[in-house]
Structure formats: structure tokens, C-alpha cells
Image: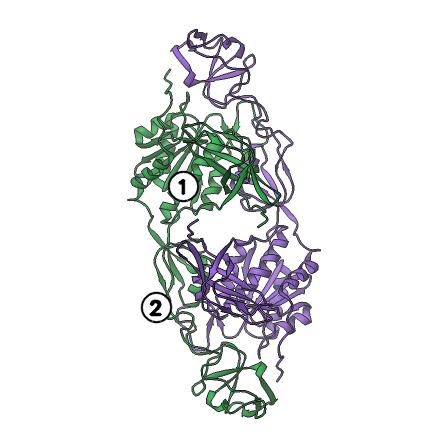
Chain colours: A green, B purple
Amino acid sequence: MKRKVYLKKTDWKDALKMLHNEFSSIFPLESEIVPVKDSLHRIIVKDTTARLSSPHYDASAMDGIVVKAEATFAASASNPKRFSIGKDVELVDTGDPIDEGFDAVIKIEDVTVLDEKTVEVKGSVPPGKDVRFTGEDFRAGDIIISRNHRIRPIDIGAMLSCGVLDVEVRKKPRVCIIPTGSEIVEPKEKLEIGEIIDCNSYIAGGMIAEWGGVPDRNPIVRNDKKEIEVAIKKAVSENEIVIVIAGSSAGLEDYTATIVKKMGKMIVHGVDLMPGKPVILAKVEDKPFVGLPGYPLSAFVILDIYVKELIAMALGIAPQMRKKIKAILEEDIVSKLGMDEIVRMKLSNRDGKLLASSLKRGAGILSSLVQADGLLHNPKDEEGVNGGSEVEIELLKGVKTDS
Amino acid sequence: MKRKVYLKKTDWKDALKMLHNEFSSIFPLESEIVPVKDSLHRIIVKDTTARLSSPHYDASAMDGIVVKAEATFAASASNPKRFSIGKDVELVDTGDPIDEGFDAVIKIEDVTVLDEKTVEVKGSVPPGKDVRFTGEDFRAGDIIISRNHRIRPIDIGAMLSCGVLDVEVRKKPRVCIIPTGSEIVEPKEKLEIGEIIDCNSYIAGGMIAEWGGVPDRNPIVRNDKKEIEVAIKKAVSENEIVIVIAGSSAGLEDYTATIVKKMGKMIVHGVDLMPGKPVILAKVEDKPFVGLPGYPLSAFVILDIYVKELIAMALGIAPQMRKKIKAILEEDIVSKLGMDEIVRMKLSNRDGKLLASSLKRGAGILSSLVQADGLLHNPKDEEGVNGGSEVEIELLKGVKTDS
């Protein structure tokens, strides 16, 4: 009976650097061409230029009449000028082309229509007035959107308005999630003693989708070395990132580390993070491999730090960071020296001050993460934080503040 | 030749209240049941309670041995105690049930395995140590997620871990977008003079999807009263919200207002917003109807205020608001008295200060919206803002600040 007693802990920030060193040669991923209409939230790969000018002809900016500006110069309230429609002026709607010989628009509110053939004007307009000139918005060849940008609805509008119908975007990383464990079962309504519902793979799937990856959940694999090995081999060949859930601590039946050492290269086994300590970061057939701890909170923290980073690297962007807010700690928080601890916090407003207090801290307690307004990061070189101190909270929810 | 000269302008905030008065009887929409696995970002309708406790049995919280705590009380470094595996103690992995007769777990790091049958322990544990008791995370019947909440990945995990497989969520509002105008054409790479690419319907589609609605784009309808009427009739019967693009100003060929007055009830025609002024807010067959101005910036502003609000009402939530940041205005901004103006702003950092300067302001200029870091709202009772003032900017992009 072999029991590995615990793993050496890597500084969790160093572990991020090690991922960058190991995978900067394979990430970001290659690109693909997609229709602009379907490109919402994709990452654009190249500076994208206008194919057409917008507008692509000189156009009226208003509903009104198009005139030769010169002809209006003498017009005033006391000296109105009359024009013949179809000869001196033309009626135009917004967007209509400015015909040759005209150079300004008078908006309809400033025009008196006397009859079907005649209008009267009580003021002058300078040349160019209310004309949208060719290329006023974009000129053909202008950069519309710069590279490494996440495409927004208005970006789609800008590209389409310039005749750009297809766009080169970063491929989305496919992330395989393999839940393991003979005690782990698919979500169901009745359980036997000893059965544990796999919720981690669904949490992972949602987070991966939010970060721009494509989650691909493998069915649960029981704790069998051979079966896990087969699943990993298949996953690595079909995906850009592979996650195995549980089997990353030092337990009796935890095979992941052994398999990873056999199939690839262990980069990090264990970090100074709580929850999240027993993570595996590895390389299997040149692909990043993450061994996720089985406790939901540990899994959440590791996903949030390392899987988010890997997806961002694959997309060639910076990882999305949460909004931070300052709050006053309501009571002392005691933490273990030598471990960076992530504490779930509840926020409240009192007398115009934002107060933070900690929630239940076990790695198995998902309820306090669901209830938390934010996360407090307590660094490893401090044994805790004193009540009354100002702390920085990463927001998990929108918070009603007085400001 | 009839030309309607302009519409009376409603205060844009009053217009929001009028929408609430008019549609609070039909919104929020009814609910539907979806699998929890597929419920990401949906709005939960009822407080959702745990079907099973989590954990649903007393379980080991660690890899180690399960013991009767009492038996360890005398153990110490100088007086280690030996236990027989399978009799006095049992080896357990995290999550294993605690068998009858045992009440505590000693983690494997604190256990010396002497041989296949014997372990040695050099310290005592209290009853309950490292045991996860039934319902420690959630008890059956506990509220897991409160209503009117947007489901996050961790919420999915929490529901599944408590045996909740289906969840009641708000139906997504279907929003039909009807682009109109004989000069409007589908996106293409070559244009004739007078043709204008429809980009607004795609901008609208992306924004609607981001807010949780389901956009349904109608093909372009040419400027024909009858054809527009038919399209609106169909859209209203199949969707919860209908948007007609363009035809909402006072131009020569703008039929929307006329049609709406015939088919339904005009609520607002024109607001004191720039861009965005010539909006139509109406009720057609009890459904909200929005006539969107044709200029991209006007369309964007109206979508961002009124369509966002209608979708939030349909979902029974508060509309998503942008993050705001304070900045110092670099130069004077002159604005029209009596109109609330929304100005596109560029932010920059200089000497540790965040500075804001305005970009091109035409309603037809999409480029400056694409480039903008944020929006400044200049209220109608002020003719502008002086350079050097502190202003509040609604962020359109993440901004690198020093703080």
C-alpha cells in the first residue's frame, strides 16, 4: 500500500509564469474565417480595414431640400427666397445622394413648401451644410477594428457598413473536462450512500464558455488507471486543453499524477493556494493538462486562475479580471501562514460604509460561494487581516453601493 | 405633398416611466422549465430549494483513516498509539462514508503506515474532526438560489449537487427587428450610388442577445406602407417586442408613425435625447413597439435605453448598467440646451490622472463609437461642460487606470 505524502507546493503566481513558459510556443491558436454576422464576442486576429468608404457617396444628412449654397446667400427672414423644385432644388430624404451641381442641404424644418413646385427659404446655408461626404465615417482602407479585440455588436455594425462580410478570428479552444471517480455519479434525484454528484464538470463547462472556450464534457470515468489513461489520450488528441477532475490529491485511489508523469511532463503539483492546493499543471502531448481538485471550491479557484489563463493565452488576450471594490472588514480573519487564502465575503452597507464579512470557508462548501458577494485574497505572508482594516474585494455579483 | 414638421419631444426619462406604465401588466413574461445543465445565464423565477442534502451522508473530508475519536485521546508524539486497520480504524478517501461506530478522521499526513494491517498515530483528534456531516453544505429544503437571479456556473453546480435537475426560468423575449427603406440593402461588397447597407439590425441583434433576448431579424422591407404593415402584423403575432428601423423621423417616405397610429397606440414620438431624438415608442396589439431612428448612433442610444429596459422588464430584472468612472474633461464640450446629449469619449492617463476628451459627434458617425472608451451624458439643462471639470463616464471598454 503506497501512500504519497504531500506534494511540494509551488508559489501560485510562479505556476502561472511556468504555464506561460511552457505554452507560449503553441498559443495563441491559429485563426479561422467566420461571417461578420456570426462573429459576436470572437477575438479578431488582424487589424481589419474598410473595403468600402462609409458613406460611399456624398449623401444628404437630413430630410429637406438640396441646393446650391450660393443661391441661398441673400436669403433671410425679411428677404425670403423662392426656389423651383426639380430645377433650383430637389427634395431629398436622409441618405439620398447629392446630385451634381448641388452642394448643401436645408433641413425640412427650415423650408416652407408653398405648392408642389415651389419652396421658400428664409436663411442661407454654407456649402457642405448637412452633407455627409464620402468617407466621412470610414474611408476605404481605414482600420475599422484593431486586432486582439473582442467583437462587440457595434463592431459588427461598423464592419458590415464598410462592406466587410468575413472576419479572421481566433479559433476557440476546445476544453475537454473528464470527471473521474468511482463514487462520482451523473446528476440525479436519488442517491445511494457513498455516491457523489458530479457538479464540478458543469461548473467548469459554464466558466469555460464564459471565457470564450468550448467545453466538451466527457462521461464520468471510474477510478481505473487504464480507463483514465484512455480518456486522457482521446481528449488530448481532440482538444486544445484537457482537465481531469479529482484524482489530483494524494489519496489512496488518485491515479492522475502517476498517469500524467507517465504520459507527459509534470509542471506543477500543488500550489500555495487555499482552496486549490492539490492542483496538477502538466503537459501531455504538447497540450496543457490541468488536474482539478475534487472539492468544488478548490476546483473553482483553480479554474478561475489557471484554466482562465490558459483560455486567454489560447485566444491571445488578457484574462478577464473581476471588478474590485474597497470595503471595511467587519471582523478579524485568521489565515494560515504560508498559504494564500481566498475567502468568500458578504458585503453590506452601513452608515454609508461598505462592510465585508467572511462566509463559511470549507473547500466543500459551495453554498457560501453561491451566497458570496465577492472574494478576499489573503496573502501567504500574513496570518490574517484585522477587523476594521480596508480590504479589496473581487466582486462576484453587482453590489448596491451608495456611490 | 404632406410633410409633417417635427414631433413634440418627451423627456427621455418620462418615456421610460411611460413604458413601465404601459407594459407592467404584460411583463415579466411567463416561465418555462429547462434542464439545469442548460440554464446558464437564464433568469430563475422562483426561490429554488435543495431536493437532497449535500453531502447526503456523513462523509470523510480528507484522505486518511476513520477512527473513534475517544481511542486517540491518549496519543501523543511521545506516546504514539497503534491501530489495527479494518478493526480499530479504516482507510478512507475524501468523500467516503463514515461507517457506524466511527466519528472522526485523521488525515493521512498525520498517520504512519507501519504495515498492511497497522497504523501509528501521534496525536489525538476530537469527535467530528474532518467529517463532513449530512447537510453541511445544503440541507434538503434549503433555498439554494433566490428568484430573479441570473444563473451563473456555480449556481448550476449548487443545484445539481442538491439533486435539482430542472429549473423554472423566465422565457426569453423574442425581439423582431424589421429593417425598412427602399435604399437599404443587405451587407455586400459592392454598392450602387444611393444604396445603404443595413448595419443597424445586426447591431440591434447583438445587443439584444447580450441582454438576454432572442433577436429575430426580418428581411429588409422596402418603403411601402402596405408591406411594412404586413411585416409588423406578422412580427407582433410571433414576438414579444417589435422594432422597426428607420421611418421614425419626419421624412418624405417615413410611414412608420402613420402605420403605428393606425394599428396601435403611440406612447412617445420623439424624446429630448441626442442622438436618438426621433424615436417611436408604441403599443401594437398589446406588444411594445419601438421605431428606431436610421442613423447608427441614434439607433444605438435608443436600443441602449429603451430596448434594454423592455428586455429587462420582460425578464423581470433590472437592466444591466455600465460601470462608471470619474475623469477630468480635457476641453470644453458645447451642447444644445434642451437636449440631453450623449457624447462619445476617449480616455487617457496623464500624470496619474484620467482624462476624457470628446470624439466626433454626428449621429451617422459609427467610427467614433467604435473607438470610444466611454460615454458622457450631458444633461439638457446645461449648455455644455467646461474643460477641467470632473465628469462621469460610462465605460464601453475596459480602461487601464493607475488605480
Q: Residues within 10 Å of mark 2 (few under 14, many from 20)?
A: few
In the rendered image, residues at marks 1 and 2 fall on the same chain = yes
State the residue in front, A106 or A242: A106
Relative to A217, say whether B225 is above or below.
below
Please report the residue visible at 63 percent of the width from the left and 54 percent of the height from the top: B314
Residue A98 in the image, given as x and y percentages of width and height:
46, 82
Report the amino acid beneath label 1.
Answer: Val
Residue B371, image x and y in percent? 43, 62
Which residue reaches farthest left? A25
Residue designated by label 1? A175
* Residue pointed to by mark 2: A141
How far apart are the two marked residues, 1 and 2, measured between alpha carbons? 37 Å
Tell whether A344 sits left or right of A161: right
Q: Along the horizontal axis of the image, is A315 left or right of B216?
A: left
Name the mark on residue A46: none
Q: Chain of mark 1?
A: A
Subunit of mark 2? A
* Residue A156 is at least partly visible in this image: no
